[in-house]
Amino acid sequence: MWKNGRHPPMPPRERAKQFMPFAAVRGLEEALAERERLVEERVELQEDLAQELDRVLHELSVGDTVRLEHFRDGRYVCETVRLTRIDELNKCLHTEEGTIIRFDDLRSAEKQ
């Protein structure tokens, strides 16, 4: 026991540590945020839409500006990009921004 039956005063720096946030499970906040994120289902193209997309893809050339709707990170996004490479062997488009878009991820493409 200490003098007068009390603990000696705690230094302010040590006392502040008691009130610091504590994460019992690392990554829990990120996992919960990811779970709450809305995810769209990937759509299987109908035959006529798939043929139209195939026709547009065959007409594209490097340097073309194209408006694409494609699946990325669990949802469909629309963006206008400039093509730097059309890789028919690996079935993907390379954009000026450095993005690689797989043919399978495309829902629509329109040459601008």
Image: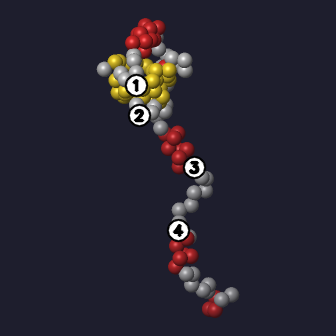
- Cα gap from disc 3 to disc 1, whole angstroms: 37 Å
| Above or below, 88 relative to 84 | above
Q: Element at badge 2?
A: loop
Q: Element at badge 3?
A: loop
Residue highlighted by disc 3: 27
Q: Earlier in the sequence, mark 2 or mark 1?
A: 1
Residue highlighted by disc 1: 83
Residue 51: percent from the left, percent from the top? 44, 8
Q: How is the image coloured?
A: secondary structure
The disc placed on residue 97 is: 2
Amino acid of disc 2: Glu
Q: Element at badge 4?
A: loop
Pointer 2 and pointer 1: residues touching (CB < 8 Å)? no
Q: Earlier in the sequence, mark 3 or mark 4?
A: 4
**Quick check: 111 left or right of 35?**
left
Q: Which residue is farthest left?
A: 112
Amino acid of disc 4: Phe
